[in-house]
Structures are given as C-alpha cells and as structure tokens.
Image (cartoon, grey):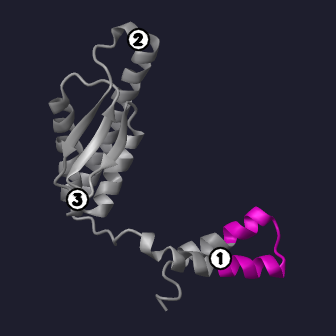
Amino acid sequence: MKHLLPAPLLSVALFLLWLLLNQTLSGGHMLLGAILGLLIPILLRGLRPLPVRIRHPLTVLRLAATVVYDSTVSNLTVVRFLMFPSQRKHAADFVHIPLELRDPNALAVLAMIVCITPGTAWAELSRDRSMLLLHVLEVGNPQEVIDHVKHHYERPLMEIFE
C-alpha cells in the first residue's frame, strides 16, 4: 500500500486542489485529479527528505526564538542601510563557513534560516556538504559571521537532527 500511496495526505490535497483550481466537480476532472493525486507523489518520491526524528524539542523552541530575534535585528539593520546608506561601515561579501552539519533535513532548515534573515543569502553548498558559501550584506569580520552561524544555528540543528 505504501508503494501505491507514499503520501496519502499529499494525494488528497492534490486531488482537492485540482478540483478547486478548475472550479468543477465533473467526472473527468475528478478522474484527472485522482490520477494526478496518485502519480505525483509516486514520481516525486525521490525528492522527499528523509524522515525526521527530533531529538531535543526544547532546542527547537530556543532555535525558533533565536531566529525571530536575529531576523528582527537584521530587518532593522537593513532598514538602517536603506535610510542612511552613509552609515554603512563595511561592504557586502561572501563568507565561507565550514560545516559539521550533514543531515539533509538540518541543512534544509539552515538554508531556510539564512534565506529568511534579511542581509544574508545562501549562495552555495560544497558537494561534500562541508562548506557553505554565504553572502552577507555587511561583513566587518568574517570570523564573527562564521561563529554566529555555527553557534546560533548549526549547533542547535545538530542537537535537533543528529
């Protein structure tokens, strides 16, 4: 049954979304929605991440609070740059961050964190997943950026996922 329906909730959601987008309950659209709901999860099964087992739920809450705080501070910094460009102390730059994190789900969460934080953007991950290239809006000391990512994000993600 798992081979035929690898993600039952996704199949149902795709079926309902198809009907909603087409705004009809005709037999043909119901059949096509069912076929899509069954085939898409099967065809895309290889893209689904590994199952997640969260080892430290309290660390998730601490990490979430850290991300909210860092995003708020970063938003204010970006607003300051936009309103007062002359106050900018350092230029944007790329920072190479060595990673110990290897879990694909944890790396995906790290990517989301740095992408939602204004002033940073995930640029590239090395093939062996040992080095992250991060673009940062203002880099005074690259080691500070490295230490921040490793301490505030990588270490908690390793506790949660590995």
The residue located at (48%, 81%) in the rendering is: 6
Residue under pointer 2: 85
Main SS type for the magenta part?
Answer: helix
Q: Is residue 129 above or below residue 11?
A: above
- Farthest residue to the front: give it: 127
Q: Is residue 98 above or below residue 15?
A: above
Quarter containing the C terminus: bottom left
Location of residue 17 in the rendering, given as x and y in whole percent from the top left corner? 68, 66
Q: Are marks 1 and 2 in contact (CB under 8 Å)?
A: no
Location of residue 72 in the rendering, given as x and y in whole percent from the top left corner? 37, 30
Identify the amino acid type marked 2: Pro
The residue located at (40%, 27%) in the rendering is: 75
Q: Which residues are magenta?
A: 16-35
Q: Nearer the viewer, residue 161 or 126?
A: 126
Residue 34 in which image quadrant: bottom right
Location of residue 123 in the rendering, given as x and y in whole percent from the top left corner? 35, 42
Identify the amino acid type marked 1: Leu
Give the class, few, some or many, for how many residues have Cα within 10 Å of label 3's Cα (few <14, many ≥20): few
SS of the residue under disc 2: helix
Q: Is residue 140 above or below residue 122?
A: above
Distance in Å between CA atoms under marks 3 and 2: 38 Å
Location of residue 101 in the rendering, given as x and y in whole percent from the top left corner? 20, 56
Q: Nearer the viewer, residue 61 or 128?
A: 128
Residue under pointer 3: 128
Please tell me the numbered disc located at residue 36. 1
The residue located at (30%, 23%) in the rendering is: 138
Identify the amino acid type marked 3: Asp
Closer mark to the observer between disc 3 and disc 2: 3
SS of the residue under disc 1: helix
Distance in Å between CA atoms under marks 1 and 3: 35 Å
